[in-house]
Amino acid sequence: MQHRRTSLAVLALMVCTLVQPVGAQETLDEARERREAVQAEAARTATELDILRAEDAEIVSALADIESYIAIQEANLESATLALAAAIDAEAEANQRASDLAAEIETLRAKVAEQSVNTYIGAFDNDDSLLLNTEDINTVPVLRYVLDESTGISEAVTDQLRAASANQADAVAEAEEASNQALALN
């Protein structure tokens, strides 16, 4: 805008100089000098206009670079926001799994405790005479297994308890990792 004003001012000056009536006293040399001065001023003005146009082009280019940078940063912010939301969701899901597994572990521990009490109490009720009175010695191991399983802690329950404990530890570790990711993104 400013270079337009400067251009208009120079143009007005040139027109005023050319329009002035040439007096009889003015010599040819003076007219030439005045024309050369006007041409020199026009050349300076043209140079200034070129400089201003170049500066305008640089400003437009810099503005485009800034807008591009802003767009990239907005995309990065959106990506970070989505990653943060995903980390928070993963943390909540892992915490819920850990809580569910804690309840399952308590149920399995109660079952193991109950079976342990039954085994302890049932140990006095085990009638080993049943094993001694069998007619076929080959059936003794089978009878012993049946007696042990009916009064003892089943391996299935203890395996379930171990698996649930391991799964809970994994869920807690996942929750901690998701929490750490969410904190890093914040």
Image (tube, rainbow, N blue to C red):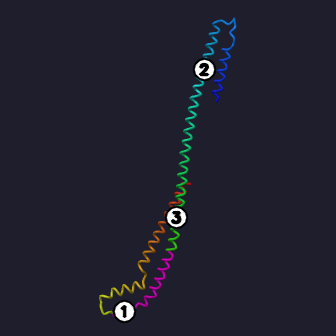
Q: In 3D space, how far apart are the residues under numbered discs 3 and 2 (Cα atoms)?
A: 73 Å
The residues colored magenta run 105-133
- The quadrant holding residue 66 is top right
Label at residue 164: none
Q: Nearer the viewer, residue 57 or 148?
A: 57
Q: Mark 3–mark 1 contact, CB under 8 Å?
A: no
Dot 1 amino acid type: Leu
* Residue 166 image point, x, y percent: 45, 69
Residue 135 appears in which quarter of the rendering?
Answer: bottom left
Question: For the C terminus, which image quadrant?
Answer: bottom right
* Circles 3 and 2: CB atoms closer than 8 Å: no
Q: Does 115 lie within the magenta span?
A: yes
Foreground disc of the pair 3, 1: 3
In the image, residue 51 sits, relative to residue 98, either above or below, namely above
Q: Label 1's element?
A: helix
The amino acid on which the numbered mark 2 sits, given as a three-letter code, is Arg
Side of 26 where 89 appears, left or right: left
Q: Where residue 58 sits: x, y (%)? A: 56, 32
- Dot 3 or dot 1, earlier in sequence: 3
The amino acid type found where label 3 is placed reads: Glu
Q: On the image, numbered disc 2 is attached to which residue? A: 44
From the top left corner, tell me how far across and down residue 56 is, in percent: 58, 31
Label annotation for residue 130: 1
- Where does the N terminus fall, quadrant-wise? top right
User: Cα distance, mark 3 to mark 1?
Assistant: 53 Å
Q: Is residue 32 magenta?
A: no
Q: Quote the CA–CA distance across marks 2 and 1.
A: 124 Å
Q: How would you rate the neighbour count of disc 3 (Cα within 10 Å): few for under 14, some for 14-19, many for 20 or more?
A: some
Q: Secondary structure at mark 2?
A: helix
Q: Nearer the viewer, residue 3 or 162?
A: 3
